[in-house]
Amino acid sequence: MNETFGRFVRRRREELARGRGGYSVRKMAAMLDIQPSYISKIEREEVKPPSEETIIQMAQVLEVDQDVLLALAGKVSADLRGIIVKRPQLFADLLRQIREAPDHAILRVVREIRDGKW
Amino acid sequence: MIELRADELVFAFPEVHPGAQATVNFQRTLRIPDDGKDYPLPPGLGRFPLRHVDDFGRAVPPSWIEHGGVLLPMYQAEALWLSFQGNYLDEHEAYYRIALKIATGKINAVSGQPWRAGLHRRPQDYVVVPEQPWLDGYCVEKGIIRQFVAMPLGAGYTAEEQVTGKAEFGGLQIMAIPMKRDVFERHFPKVPTRPIVREPRSSVICFSAGGSEMGLAPGGRMRQEISEDPFDLADWDLEHASRCFIHICNSKDWQAITGEQPPTEPPTAAAYTKAGMPWFDYYSEREAVAGSKVLAGLQSVATLGRRRRKKPLPENETVKVDRVINLRPVQLKGRVREYIC
């Protein structure tokens, strides 16, 4: 993942602004209830990425996957942390085993609902 | 393949088309009075929790493990409706069409016929997503359904028991069949790419909202059309059908089985209406299927209860509905009956 958090936020915001308007720094700041200057600093990477809560709100406003945005900020969402902490050995082992696997192989790990005998 | 994601069944057919997908969730709702009057659509009060039956091997009946699928909790005499969402493909400016066949206790909820593979017309035994946004009950007349109401399997109220005389399966069964890829691409060819403009998401209204085996029985009457399939029967890719068995467990046993609290009981229709909350009506221009004679012949829970000198439905008084929100197909992308709390 070569893209950084600030650059991604700026690119996505500008993309939405071109598509439908209403995505100026000022308007996005109003949607998130934070200062416009803070958004500018985030985009210019003059400050560290915001809190998990703010990143999740940003993901909704920017209509992107919250886990992708959190990952760009070097974070893992609280619910995923909770899953790992509950069974750390199992998930650590699983993640290490599949870390080099291609996407299509990982997708096969997704749990399907079993169909039985009707 | 079928996945369980956030209490929703995701039917996907990546082998047919990357966008061939539809989701189904089960909405908690009010039980409308079973008094012979026709009611508008009640609201959705959030999704029922869904869990894999395989996760509770020793706590559920062996037949559930044999059937596979998922389980959800319902109180006796509680109602539900099925909410359907299609997958919108920007490059085609269209939803990928998926046909859904729905049965309770393996009795088809649209045609009243016993479960069989494939799709059929005359009578039509399935719905098409997104043309059909939801299903609240059994199609008993053109434009009228009888609400799905949970009753203990074996008590004689369920559609299955009334049609077959047996309490064998209970629960719900769903089969999804995607449209053939070449047919979809012919009906909905790709459009030249341009900046994607999604509709802003509308604000979601938030309302604060026997044995363990249950089946579904016909409850009160509701105005709801089941749309005719606007496509040809040959347009559906029957080689790629997926099916799922949804077992219904009595809510009082949910915690013992899963370790989780079941949802609270929904408000009564009278309390909800008295609080000034809205009901809904939905009109589309589409032709509706005629009701099933088999389903029209079923006795509703209240009727059967009266004949047995029992009162299976508490709080079944007639409700005068004043506040009705009219929904149109164009609104469905942004505004729907279900509320996420």
Image (cartoon, grey):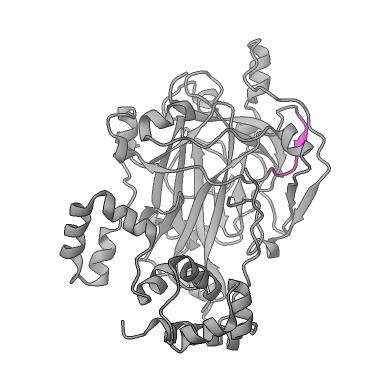
Count of numbered marks: 0
**Of residues B60 and B180, the one drawn nearer to the viewer in this rendering:** B60
Q: Is residue A106 left or right of residue A63?
A: left
Residue A17 place in picture, x, y as percent? 59, 86
Residue B332: name its quadrant.
Answer: bottom right
- Residue depicted at 32% across the width and 29% down the height: B59
Q: Main secondary structure of the magenta part?
A: loop
Q: Is residue B183 above or below residue A41?
A: above
Q: Is residue A94 left or right of residue A53?
A: left
Residues drawn in magenta: B36-42
Residue B246 in sight from this viewpoint:
yes
Residue B209: name its quadrant.
Answer: top right
Asked if residue B89 lies in the magenta stretch, the reply is no
Q: Is residue A51 left or right of residue B317?
A: left
Residue A15 in sight from this viewpoint:
no
Residue B302 place in picture, x, y as percent? 67, 22
> In the rendered image, which quarter contains the N terminus of chain B?
bottom left
Point out the residue furthest to the top here: B309
- Residue depicted at 63% across the width and 54% down the height: B228
Q: Is residue B140 above or below residue A86?
A: above
Residue B33 place in picture, x, y as percent? 72, 30
Residue B46 place in picture, x, y as percent? 57, 46
- Residue depicted at 58% across the width and 60% down the height: B130
